[in-house]
Image: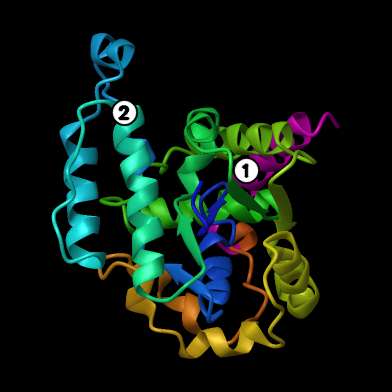
Amino acid sequence: MTDTKRVMILGCPRSGTTLLQAILSAHDEVFSLPETHFYPQLCSSNPFFRYLGISTQAARSNLIQIGKDHLNKKIKTSLLTKKLSQSFLETLDQASQIGGKTTWLEKTPQNLWFLPFIKSISKNIRFIHIEREPKDVIASIHYASTKYPESWGYSNLNDTIQLWGESHKINNEYRGLLNHFHCSYEELVKSPNCLIRNILDFLSMDFIKDLHLSYINNKSENIINGNEVWKNSVFQKLLSAKSKFLTHFTDEQQARVLVAVNSFNGA
């Protein structure tokens, strides 16, 4: 078992995952990197290959690039999804150790959908789920999809609502379980020191006061790819984001969203 602490931040996109990653990455024990999308890429869309557990070329190339970027060497890859996944985790372990860090932090929100597989590979990963007011998440996803359609595929409002709904359901399935910590974007903004203390306790790490202030000076290239322009606002003073729900949606769309959210919540 590795001595390196393994941590993943996940949740519905546009829920504050990047902000939380930026803050925690400012801790001097943490190694982090931009979203890898490794697990969403890992399994083939071909049912036969999926049955055999054959990994995709995209996932193998992804891991090779991570090795070049952070280990300065070529990673030997496997055709098998489980072996490739193990190599991915071990590569992040090594990258952390090279940097003198005790902990690595990987943030790909969509890992939420792959939790059963990820947990079958490693029992010692700790997962931080961050959630946000539903109507604000849905509005933010839809806004990003209309502004950056080449990167986001949720310009259809029903698809946006479904994405949040499925994320909400999965988050609930892991609530209260060992190695899973749930928090909210609103809590992070309102009481950052309190929430960060609780997260660091969960990770068995030393608390650093006002980590939410020092993260602004963190290097964004460590966690944000150059083409992810919608994340640039993360490295600004921690403030409650203005909701796009009222400004982006029409009255009819607002009503549809509220009805959908209430139905998911059993209201």
Residue 239 vs residue 146, the one in the foreground: 239
Instruction: Name the residue located 69 percent from the left edge and 46 percent from the top edge.
Output: 180
The residue pinned by badge 1 equals: 252
Question: What secondary structure is found at the residue carrying circle 2?
Answer: helix
Q: Compared with residue 192, is residue 116 higher up or lower down, i.e. above or below? A: above
Question: What secondary structure is found at the residue carrying circle 1?
Answer: helix
In the image: residue 47, left or right of residue 162: left
Q: Amino acid at mark 2?
A: Thr
Residue 225 in which image quadrant: bottom left
Q: Is residue 260 magenta?
A: yes
The residue pinned by badge 2 equals: 81
- Per the model, the C-alpha gap separating discs 2 and 1 is 45 Å
In the image: residue 73, left or right of residue 251: left
Q: Is residue 212 magenta?
A: no
Instruction: Name the residue located 67 percent from the left edge and 50 percent from the top edge.
Output: 135
Task: Confirm or deny contact between disc 2 and disc 1 (CB under 8 A).
Answer: no
Image coordinates of residue 10 in percent, x first then y, are: 55, 49
**Mark 1 neighbour class, 10 Å CA radius: few under 14, some 14 to 19, many 20 or more:** few
Start-end of magenta stretch: 247-267
Could one spot residue 99 in this view of the protein?
Answer: yes
The kind of secondary structure the magenta stretch mainly shows is helix
Instruction: Name the residue located 53 percent from the left edge and 67 percent from the top edge.
Output: 21
In the image: residue 125, left or right of residue 172: left
Q: Compared with residue 195, is residue 112 higher up or lower down, i.e. above or below? A: above
